[in-house]
Image (cartoon, grey):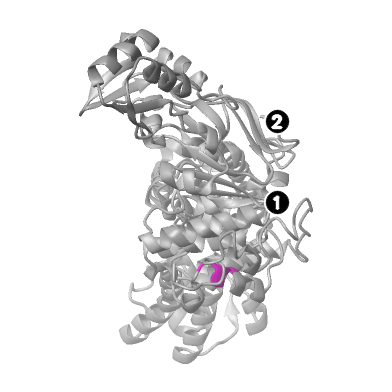
Amino acid sequence: MDCGTPILTTHALTKQFGRIRAVDGLDLSVCRGDVFGFLGPNGAGKTTVIRLVLGLIHPTSGHAEVCGHRVPGELQGALRHVAGFVDDPTFYPLMSARRNLRLLGSMTGPVSAQRIDEVLEIAGLRERADDRVGGFSHGMKQRLGIAQALLHSPELIVLDEPTSGLDPRGMKDVRELIRGLGAAGTTVFLSSHLLHEVEQVCTRAVIIDRGRVVVQGPVSELRPQNDTVRVLTDDQSKAGEVLRAQFGAGGVADDEGYLVVQAGEGAVPEMVRRLVADGVAVRAVVPAPEQGLEDFFLELTGTDGEGPAPAKRRAGLARLLPGGRR
Amino acid sequence: MTAGGPGMDGGSAHGSTLPRLPGSAAHGSTLPRMPGRAWGPLRREWMKLIFQRRSYLIWGGAFAIPFLIALALDLAGGDPHGGEGPLFFARVTGNGMYVALAALTALLPLLLPMAAAMVAGYMIAGEAELGTLRILLLRPVRRGSVIVAKWSMAMIYLAVGFGLMLASGLLFGATFFGLRPMVTLSGSTVSVWHGLALILLCCLYGLAAMACIVSLALLFSTLTDSSLTALIATVVVYSVIQVLISFSYFDWLRPWVFPSYFLEYVSFFRDPIYWTPILKGLAAFAAWSGGLTLAAHLLFRRKDVLS
């Protein structure tokens, strides 16, 4: 991935827990200014990767580079430029939100009361600032987690499923906040298993499965290109013959009165010209419903959790993913 | 998220309304170090301690027990054991100065080691249990300094406990029996102020003894994510050592284990002070506490924080 100096990279990062290889030679690259989606099904190794990158656990082999500092070797240097949370954000339950922020913030550097008020305002917790965190809902703790991450205006913010437990309004607010952070030039590393969230918020993304990168690249390129069209003519039988002659029997199917054609990139004008030349009046050519990122994700990672995604699927996807295939 | 938070409804279109968004001021810079940062970790650990209810239970016990001793002996109207009681108890009714010493004798083998094991056992494992360990270690702090701060705070906590015990002992000793010049174990008499200094030295010795328990509990605290496990492991190890050295067969073990030296503070009450056992005890405490804390440090540095 060419993006000047990446803010976060991993190099053959590997973590083995006993016989289980949770992260397997992972190579990631996050560009400065990205809102980077980190996608994977449950158990894919997302949280383990975040723990490795932030120095909470030690790699079996490989390393990461975060804001120009090698992790784990120069962890303290890296952590001066990074903030965020892993798993659910947790706090001291008998202390107020404000006191928690003061205590955690002071570990990075001086933090003013005004800044604490600002981040509480951003997180929508200003009115609950002096309440004990023990009485907070899960969603409020998530928001406080974001507030503590913002305290020192870090270069890189790592958020592990920040919208989990939030109501729809809260989810929308957090996503807008993340977009706002990205617009202001902060790099955000957003771990999520919500594909539409990544589609809405992120500029680039990686999909991992079983501790390995399946694919990474710009989000706009992650969704497979859709070259399938549905064709309606005044003579579907004859049209079927013409189209099978052009695209082969496997490329054409009947579906509820339409002919579904895997036309391929740029082939639609030629298809229509041939139909018209053979005397078939074309009533409609419409794109087939798009394969969503969700389907694509399931196809890539497998849904049954048994063994890796078939190699031929991956190979087939290579053509769909010009910028980021790994 | 409440509706209308200025940052939250900013989005990309209103991004400029976000106050001091990340990536602006601190971009590419190194944050300044805190002034007086040596005290910062201690201050944070102190805040955590005073925001735990259990902290006050132990302190309450340390304050209450001298009062109960004084009250019980006063109600009994004299020596409850006919002169055969524990060290210093028999002298309490004649002189309130001995209340604090009697309390130290009563607490040092059990409550104080339990308090030390509880507070130090909670230090790492309790944070892991709560989930705050991971959010703590995402801040740019060295794990070594975390261990040092937590060890120091456990000792400060216990020092407060000793202070409360001493204050309570003197307060209720004075109230019930009055404070008078003390008779040493060698039979000589020392003034009230001299006696107070000796009692203070005894408490400091007891505190040094507790450093071993603190270090042992801290070691277990780094090995587990359950503070209760750390507490129980510490109490078991301590109890096993106590049981072993109570049998003459294991006399060879006595010089090597720290609980053997716990009651050596009585040597402060010989005239002149008999320093040899005291210094041996302090050396044993330093060696054990140092070794166990170093082990805790090394383990914590390599610990995978999965809590």
Residue B260 in the image, given as x and y percentages of width and height: 51, 49
Count residues near mark 1 (Cα–Cα under 10 Å), then give few for <14, some for 14-19, many for 20+: many
Residue A161 in the image, given as x and y percentages of width and height: 45, 48
Q: Which residues are magenta?
A: A119-123
Q: Would residue B277 be seen by someone viewing this image from the given angle? A: no
Q: Which residue in the structure is indicated by mark 1?
A: A80
Tags 1 and 2 touching, CB below 8 Å: no
> Which numbered tag is attached to residue A2?
2
Q: Is residue B176 magenta?
A: no
Type of secondary structure dominating the magenta stretch: helix
> Which numbered tag is attached to residue B192?
none
A165, B271: nearer the viewer: A165
Q: CA distance from mark 1 to mark 2?
A: 25 Å
- Which is nearer the N-term, disc 1 or disc 2? 2
Image side of residue B77 versus residue B51, left or right: left
Residue A22 in the image, given as x and y percentages of width and height: 46, 28
A194, B43: nearer the viewer: A194
Q: Residue furthest left?
A: A256
State the SS at label 1.
loop
State the SS at label 2.
loop
Q: Would residue A67 be seen by someone viewing this image from the given angle? A: yes
Please state which amino acid type lies under the numbered disc 1. Answer: Arg
Residue B28 in the image, given as x and y percentages of width and height: 78, 50
B285, B76: nearer the viewer: B285
